[in-house]
Amino acid sequence: MSKWVGIGLCLAGLVLGSPLALLFLLGGAGGAPAAGAALAVVPGDPAPGTHLPTGAVLSAAESATAGLILRTDAASATGTVLVEVATIDAGWTESRLTASAQGGTHSLGVYQERATQGWGTSTQELAPATATKMWLAHLPAGWQQMTAPQLDQSVERSKYPARYVTNEATATVLVTDATEGGVLTTALSAGGANVPPARWVPPPGTDPAAATAAAFAIAQIGKPYVWGGTGPTGYDCSGLVQAAWKAAGVAIPRTTYTQVAVGAPVPAIATLAPGDLIFIMGSDPMGTLPGHVGIDVGYGELVDAPYTGHPIEEIPVSDWAGNIVAMRHIA
């Protein structure tokens, strides 16, 4: 469950540590933000002892370094979920989040960068927060359209870029866990339906795999709809939900006609949870099988890759309420 910790700041005359302030920031007594809104948190440390997709178990030292990196990301102008996953992926891949000098002056710190190639002094590279700031300063133009492994390779220029793909799931788990343990700071206004939120916080009790799938879908907001697209630069509706669950380590079929039979039925809109698939007939059904699908992301919202010429967006589930023909919970 998410842990909300008041931090004693004031907003609109309310102290964040008070229940009234928390209700204000969460969007009212119902505890859900307004449609399209997101919650910003200062990430905590992912829990030591967490079992990761690679089979590794997170140590206390690795947890502390991950939290420090994520808080550095969050404080930067580029602090998005994509950047958080990328920096943790790079740090885990290069050093398993250990600020070491195992390669001498040629491979230093969490990211194993070279002081001789413009990456600061040895002291700076061995300090995870400072090294992360330098890493962020090397983000290339157009990084927002990259995947985390692509972003890692553009900065690290590794001889072995496939490692970043392998460790992306581990990084996603750590980012999700750190966000759930973070400190609520403010409510963000929607920047438009086609702008990814700066941070998405899973509703309390969200299954970790489902949270990963929902977070992946949210990170694609604004990318183009591409008929037959399976990413990473564009998706169609079923390609998006398949990729979202793939990011969580769960394989589901490619088309809406087959996806509608996966998992278990969701009995009512009120019981939808992040990661659940929501189906409508759309413009190209196959007989009685639905031709369009979106993915629930909590708070009464879904992410949808709608049609050619319209980018991936977040919309209220209520927009589909009269047309939903099936809802499926992916185990």
Image (cartoon, grey):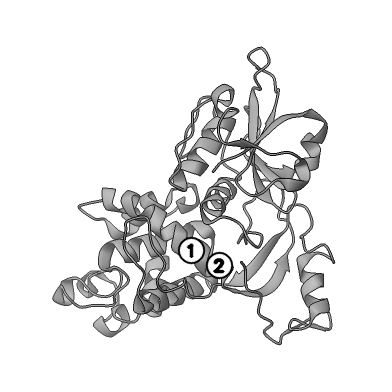
Task: Say which amino acid is labelled 1.
Answer: Val
Residue drawn at x 64%, y 32% is: 293
Q: Is residue 186 left or right of residue 130?
A: right
Q: Nearer the viewer, residue 205 or 102?
A: 205
* Residue 85 visible in rendering: no
The picture places residue 219, in percent across and down from the top left corner, at 55, 50
Q: Mark 2–mark 1 contact, CB under 8 Å?
A: yes
Task: Identify which residue, 30 or 27, lies in the foreground.
Answer: 30
Indicate whether 41 appears above or below 326. below
* Residue type highlighted by circle 2: Thr
- Residue located at (37% from left, 68% from top): 135
With respect to residue 269, does 310 lie above or below?
A: above
Residue 190 percent location from the top left of the image: 73, 56
**Residue with the mark numbered 1:** 175
What separation in Å lies between label 2 and label 1 (alpha carbons)?
Answer: 6 Å
Q: Which of the image's four quarters has the C terminus?
A: top right
- Relative height, residue 41 to residue 230 (above, below): below
Taking the image as shown, residue 125 lies to the left or right of residue 302, namely left
Mark 1: which secondary structure?
Answer: helix
Provide residue 179's location: percent of width, then percent of height. Answer: 55, 67
Q: Is residue 257 visible?
A: yes
Question: Could you say whether the residue bearing mark 2 is in a helix, strand or loop?
Answer: helix
Left or right side of 97 for 141? right
At 66% across and 33% down in the image, what residue appears? 310
Which residue is labeled 2 in the image?
Answer: 179
